[in-house]
Amino acid sequence: MTSSDMMPPDNDDLHAQVASRLGLLPDFYGSAALPAGPAAALWAFAKAAYLDIPLPSLLKERLFVHLSRFCEVRYCIVRHVGFLIGAGRPAGDAHVPPLTVQQVMRLLRRPVPVAAQLDRAIREMEARTGPAGLPEPDTADEARLFDALTVLFLAPSQAGRVREGVAKLVGAANLELLTGFLAFVRAAHWWTEMYPQLNYEPDAIACMGRDPALAALMLDGSEAMQAALDRDEHRLAAARLREREADLARVQRIGGVGGIDIDVADGMRAWRSPEYLRLHGLPPDAREETHAQWRARVHPEDRDQAERTLMDALNGESGGYDSEYRIVRPSDGEVRWIHARADIERDADGRAVRLVGAHIDVTESKRMYAAVRESEERQKVLIAELQHRTRNLMGVVRVLADRTARASTSLDDFRARLDDRLAALSRVQGLLSRLDEYDRVTFDELLDTEIAALAADAGRVTRRGPAGVRLRSSTVQTLAMALHELAINAMKYGALAQPSGRLAVQWSLERAGPDGGPWLHVDWRETGVRMPPQAATRMGHGRELIEQALPYQLGARTSCDFGGDGLHCTLSIPVSASTP
C-alpha cells in the first residue's frame, strides 16, 4: 500500500475512482455540497460492503433496488434502477447484462409479505437439510430470501429466527456477507436523507421521461412504506436513529475516519465520534472535551502551530480547515500523526459558529514516506559509490593493460598475462560486492581466494596467522593485485614451479602500529627454489606494485629480496579499526 492510499482522496481523485468503477459519477458521491472526507469514507464502505463482497453482482443490485422501496427519499431507488437497466454498472460490474424495463417493474411490484406469508417462507427455509446456495434472479428462492432480508433490514432486533432461516437457505458465510451489505444500504439511505439536495442524474431523468409507468413505481413508495412501517412511529424513529448512528460509526471505523463537531459559538466545546476516540487514545466516555484538553494532547513541538492554524481558519473567511500535527495518545503514550480536515459554518456576519470535520491517523503513511526518502538517499550514496568504483576500476584496467603490454613478448603472452590479472581483479570485485556498509574483507579470505585460483598442491603451501583481520575496503583491490603477482610468480618461476619448492605465508596483527591503529604484517617466504640470474627482472610489474604502489597508495611498508633459496617478501599495512 502507498502513502496516498492512507490519505482520503480529494474530490477529483474520489470522483475519478467512482466513475471508473460505476461507469458514471452519481450525485451520491459527486455533489459539490458533500464534504470530501465523509464522502471518501462512504466510498470505502461501499467498496468493502457492496462492490467487492463475493456475492453475484446482479443479486446485489436487485436487492439494493428492493430494499430502497422502503426509503422515504427516492434517490437510491431511482439511481439503482438505472444501474439495472444499463445506465452505469450494476454493483460496479461491467459484465452484468442490463435488465429490461419489464423485468425491473416486476421486481418493483413484488408485494411486501404479510405475516402468514413470511412465516411460511421461513418454515420452508428451516426445513432445508443443507444450504441451497444463492438463488437465481426472479425465482421463488430469491423471493423468499428478499422477504426475509426485508425483515432483517427493517427490524433487525426482532429477526433472530429470520437469520437462522436465511443461514439455512444460503449458508452462514453468505448470511454474514448479506448482513454487511444491508448495513451499507441502510447507511446509503441515511446519507440521502441527510443530504436532500442530491439530484437525480440526467440519465435517470431521461429514463423516467421515456417510461412514465416505471417512473411512477420508483417515485411513489407510499404503499410499500405503509406496509413496512406498521409499528409505533416514535419507537421506530428512535430505533432507526440508533441504528444509523451505529452504521455511521461503522463507516468511520472501516474508513479510519474520526468525526468531530465543534460548537465554536459556545466556547469551542467538541463532540467526538467513537472512531475519533480510538484514534486519539481516549476512553469511550470522553465524547465531549474542551479546547484546552485538545491542546494539551497535541505534541509540544506542534502545539502552537496547530492551534495557530485552527484559529487562523476560524477567524478568517475560508469555509474549510486543513492541518497536520502530532498528538501524544493518553492511552499508551504513543506519538501519532493526525490529518484534520473540516468544513466551517459561519453566520450572516461571517463569524465561525460550527466546525464539522474528520480526523485520520496518517502515522504509517508518514513512516512510509520517511522510509522511501531514506531509501532514495541510500540509493544516491550507492550510485555515487558505484560510479566512483567504476571509474577507479577502469583506471586500474587501463594501467594493467598498459604495463602488461610493455612487459609482454608477444600477443599470446599479452593475452595470457592480462587474462590472469583481470581474473584476479574480478575475484576481488566479487568479494567486495558481497559486503554491506559494515562488513569488511578479511586478509585470510583474500589470501585463500588467490591461492585457490592457482590450483596448486596444497601440501606445498603453509599459511599461519590470526583469522578475521579486517582490511580497509580502500586497500583490498591493490593488496589483492599484489598477492596475485606474488602467487603467479611462485606458480610460474618460484616455489610452486619447482618440485622441491615450498611456500610459507605468515601474518600477524599489531594492535598499535606506527600510526596508533592496527597494522597487518605479512611474511611471504619461498624456499627450495633454484633462482636463475634474471629472477628479479621477471617480476617487473609485480615488484613495482609491491615496492612502489603499496607504499604510495596504502602507506604500506614493503620489501622484496631474491635470495639464493627463493623470494622473500614482507608487507606491513594499516587495517580496519573494526578488527576484533
Image (spheres, grey):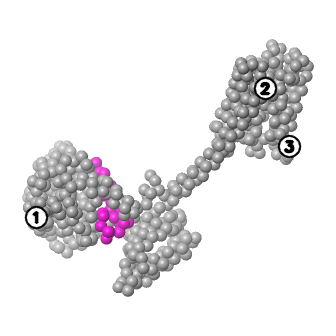
Q: Is residue 67 visible?
A: no
Q: Where is mark 3, residue-wise?
A: 513
Q: CA–CA distance between discs 3 and 1?
A: 99 Å
The answer to whether residue 432 is left or right of residue 464 is left
Residue 132 in which image quadrant: top left
Q: Where is mark 1, residue-wise?
A: 216
Residue 406 has which mark?
2
Residue 155 has which mark?
none
Residue at the spot 20% in from the left edge and 50% down from the top edge:
58
The answer to whether residue 243 is left or right of residue 136 is right
Amino acid type assigned to the residue bearing label 1 in the image = Ala
Which segment did they paint magenta? 29-55
The answer to whether residue 13 is left or right of residue 312 is left
Q: Residues within 10 Å of mark 2 (few under 14, many from 20)?
A: few
Q: Are marks 2 and 1 in contact (CB under 8 Å)?
A: no
Q: Residues within 10 Å of mark 3 (few under 14, many from 20)?
A: some
- Where residue 394 appears, as percent x and y from the top left, is 69, 36
Q: CA–CA distance between discs 2 and 1?
A: 101 Å
Q: Name the front one of labels 3 and 1.
A: 1
Question: Quick one: 379 or 140, which is closer to the camera?
Answer: 379
Residue at the spot 39% in from the left edge and 63% down from the top edge:
10
- Where residue 181 appears, as percent x and y from the top left, is 26, 56
Decide whether residue 27 is among the magenta residues: no
Q: Quick one: quadrant of the C terminus?
A: top right
Secondary structure of the residue carrying numbered label 2: helix
Question: Quick one: 535 or 374, which is closer to the camera?
Answer: 535
Of the image marks 2 and 1, the number of the one nearer the N terminus: 1
Q: Name the front one of labels 2 and 1.
A: 2
